[in-house]
Image (tube, rainbow, N blue to C red):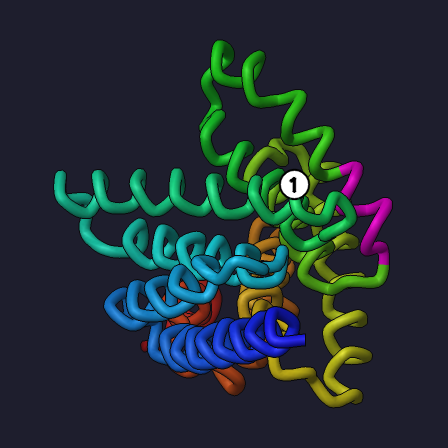
Amino acid sequence: MVIAALLARADDRADALAAAGIAEFTAAYQAWDGQRFAAAAELCRQATTNVTASSTHFYWLGAAHFHLMLQLRSQPATRSNTLAASAALDAALTALNTAVRLDERHAESHALLGTLYGMKIDGNLIRGARFGPRVSSHSKQALEFGANNPRLWYLLGTGQFHTAKKPAAQREALATFLKAEQLYEAEAKGPAGPLEPRWGHESCLTFIGRTYERLGENSKSAEYFRKALNRHPTDHLAREGLTRVTGKQ
């Protein structure tokens, strides 16, 4: 009983650290603040040091590093930013691979892994041969285990968006993003648990706007860029996109 009590206390401490990390992650997401993403990652890392660390803790560690990487990539492409972004990407891969080893059915971890391995390919044929099967495998498992998860469809859509060359493929990406939007709206109607993810809705709206822009549908594009900015005023991609399609600063 003493051991059980100690383990329960350790679990509570790990969950408290993870919850603090999630709160910092949410603040970082709203401000698009790299230092706060790094702080969120550190809190989540501390949660994973618990002897009974769960896939959820490693998922959040991976998600924090993933967004830190994106934030660094959105900054000027200095050598230090490029190196830091690469390190954050590798840290995200390590954490998320641990998450799926602990729980092979963790759909969001699979979806993030598919996205990250796709980013590592970056149009290179040799890297495509190496990482392409991992992208396919993780994407398949994400769909198998989380078909109604909005972040899964949003991440799947980003992969389609970045590889779409022709209008038909761009329409396919748009359909994926619109499905994600519907699932985000359904998710928002219910309460979130303390460790439950709720990120990505704003960015999904931005990608819908970017996809409509590529298709030449500027009125729909502007509509979605405005939706994104209403939810997330610091979204620089949505603001830049709105300026492009309306010609207004």
Residue furthest out toward the left: 79
Question: How far from the left and from the top, in percent, is residue 7?
Answer: 59, 70
Question: How far from the left and from the top, in percent, is residue 161?
Answer: 61, 44
The number of callouts visible is 1
Q: Is residue 146 within the magenta segment? A: yes
Compared with 100, 50 (above or below) is: below
Does residue 238 appear in this view?
A: yes
Compared with 245, 233 (above or below) is: below
The residue identified by callout 1 is 101
The part of the image, by quadrant, that contains residue 200 is bottom right
On screen, residue 205 versus residue 28, left or right, reads: right
Nearest to the observer: residue 201 or residue 166 = 201
Question: Which amino acid lies under the numbered mark 1 shown in the image of this protein?
Answer: Arg
Residue displayed at 85% across by 55% down = 147
Q: Secondary structure at mark 1?
A: helix
Question: How far from the left and from the top, in percent, is residue 241?
Answer: 44, 64
Q: Main secondary structure of the magenta part?
A: helix
Question: How far from the left and from the top, in percent, is residue 221?
Answer: 59, 66
Compared with 85, 134 (above or below) is: above
The part of the image, by quadrant, that contains residue 86 is top left
Label 1 environment density (alpha carbons within 10 Å; few <14, some 14–19, many ≥20): few
Residue displayed at 65% across by 72% down = 4
Nearest to the observer: residue 82 or residue 19 = 19
On screen, residue 168 versus residue 60, left or right, reads: right
Residue furthest out toward the front: 2
Residue displayed at 72% across by 37% down = 169
On screen, residue 140 versus residue 205, left or right, reads: right
Q: Which residues are magenta?
A: 140-147
Does residue 224 appear in this view?
A: no
Residue displayed at 19% across by 47% down = 81
Q: Is residue 65 within the magenta segment? A: no
Q: Quadrant of the C terminus?
A: bottom left
